[in-house]
Image (tube, rainbow, N blue to C red):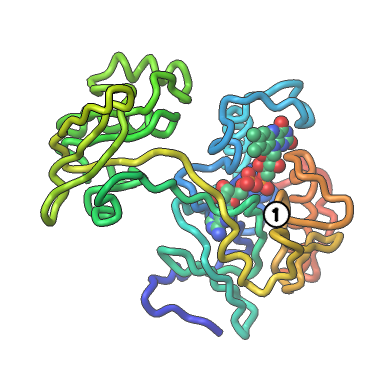
Amino acid sequence: MGTDLQLPYDERVYDITIIGGGPVGLFTAFYAGIRDASTKIIDSLPQLGGQLSELYPEKFIYDVAGFPKIRAMDLVDQLIEQTGQYHPAVCLGEKVLNLIKREDGTFELHTDRKVHLSRSVIVTAGIGAFTPKSLPGDNVKEFEGNGIYYYIDDLKRFRNKRVLVVGGGDTAVDFALMLDGTAKAVTMIHRRDQFRAHEENVKSLFASGVDVKTFYELKAAYGNTALTGATIIENRSRRTEELEVDAIIGSLGFSASLGPILEWGLELVGNEIVVDSRMGTNIPGVYAAGDIVTYPGKIKLIATGFGEAPTAVNNAKTYLDPTSKLHPGHSSSRKE
Ligand SMILES: Cc1cc2nc3c(=O)[nH]c(=O)nc-3n(C[C@H](O)[C@H](O)[C@H](O)COP(=O)(O)OP(=O)(O)OC[C@H]3O[C@@H](n4cnc5c(N)ncnc54)[C@H](O)[C@@H]3O)c2cc1C
C-alpha cells in the first residue's frame, strides 16, 4: 500500500478513473456514464481533446464513422457535449505520476497535485502526457513558477500586471486575449509574422489592446527576487529591446512522453500497454484503450479507439460488479 503524506487526498472513491482526456478517454467517460459508473477524467493538459486539440485542431478528419468530414476541434466539442450528459469529474493540468493498488483493491492515482481514489482505472493516455516546452533564454529557469508561467490557471494572478506572452499558436493567442482587459498591459512576441492560430482568433488579437510584435524572441528574463523585465531580440536585425514586465507566459507548444506510466508494473511492449480481448492489462482492475495499447493487429486510429472504449468499460463494469451484465443492451434503453 502506498501513501503520499505531502499531497492532499480527494476522498471520494470513483468507480472508474480515466487517465487521459483525448478522444478515446472522452468516449470512454461517456460510455462509463451509460453504465452508471461514477467517473473521473484526469489529463495533464489544460484542455480536453488530446492530440486533436494539441497537435491538429484545425485539420479535417475523414475517417470517423458518421462524419464524412469533421474539423478535429469540432469532433472534440461533440465528444465533450456527449460525455457531459453524465457529468464526469474532470481534473485538468494534472499529470498522473504513480498508480498504486491498495490491499483492499482501491487504486491510488498520485498526480503532481493530489491523490485520487478509484475502484478501477482505464488508461487512455495515447502517446503520453504533454508538458509545455520551456522558454529559451537566460535566467528563465530561475523565474519559473515565480514570474514565468506556462498556463493561466488563475487569471487574477495577472490583474494590473505587465505581461509578456511568447508564442504564436492558438493557445498563445487565447492567453493574450484572456489577459487583455485584466492585465495592465499585454505584449505578445512571435518569431514569425505567420500565426498558427485560428484566423478569427488572430483577427481578434489585432483588434485588441495587445501589443503584438512579430519577428521577436525572448533573450533573457531579469529581476532581483521578483521578475521585473525581459530582453527581447528582433531576429532579423539582432537588435535587442528591454521590456518592463511583471510576468512572462510561455506558449511554445507541448512535447509528449509516457514517462511515469512505464514504471507502474504494467506489461509493456516498447511504449505500449499489452491488453487482452477485454482490454484488460496484467493488473486486475486496470484496463486500457486507444493509441497506448497493443495487441495483434492493433491500428492506431480514433475509430479503433472508439471501438475499444466500450469493451474496456463493459469489462470494467463486470469487474466492479460481477453480477452486472457484460453486454449493456441498447443505448436507447439507458437511463436519461
Ligand atoms: C497530425 C496527426 C493527424 C492525425 N490524423 C488522424 C486522422 O485523420 N484520423 C484518425 O483516426 N487518427 C488520426 N491521428 C491519430 C489520432 O490523433 C490518435 O489515434 C488519437 O488521438 C488517439 O486518441 P487517444 O485518446 O488514445 O490519445 P491522445 O489523443 O494522445 O490523448 C491522450 C491524453 O492522455 C493524456 N495523458 C497521457 N499521459 C498522462 C498522464 N500520465 N497523466 C495525465 N494525462 C495523461 C495526454 O495529455 C492526452 O491528452 C492523427 C495524429 C496526428 C499526430
Q: Quadrant of residue 276?
A: bottom right
* Quadrant location of the N terminus in the rendered image: bottom right
Residue drawn at (70%, 54%), measured in percent from left and top? 292
> Quarter holding the C terminus?
top right
Horizontal side of residue 154 vs 36, given as left or right: left
**Percent x, y of residue 38:** 60, 59
Q: Is residue 12 above or below residue 218?
A: below
Mark 1 packing: few (<14 Cα in 10 Å), some, or many (20+)?
Answer: many
Q: Residue at (44%, 47%) from the top-left corner?
A: 132
Residue at 58% across, 38% down: 80
Which amino acid is tagged 1?
Answer: Ile
* Closer-to-camera residue (292/284): 292
Classify the position of ligand 1 by quadrant: top left, top right, bottom left or bottom right.
top right
Q: Name, please, the residue furthest toward the front.
A: 237
Image location of residue 335, percent across then percent down: 69, 47
Q: Give the vertical position of 77 relative to 306 (above or below).
A: above
Percent position (x, y) of residue 319? 75, 69
Q: Which residue is mark 1?
A: 292
Asked whether mark 1 lies closer than 8 Å to ligand 1, one says: yes
Mark 1: which secondary structure? helix
How many discs appear?
1
* Vertical order, 218 against 67 (above or below): below
Q: Is residue 140 visible?
A: yes
In this view of the protein, can residue 317 be seen by the observer?
Answer: no
Q: What residue do we see at 18% from left, 39% from top?
A: 159
Q: Quadrant of residue 216?
A: top left
259 or 160, which lies in front?
Answer: 259
Quarter occupied by residue 325: bottom right
Q: Is residue 111 left or right of residue 84?
A: left
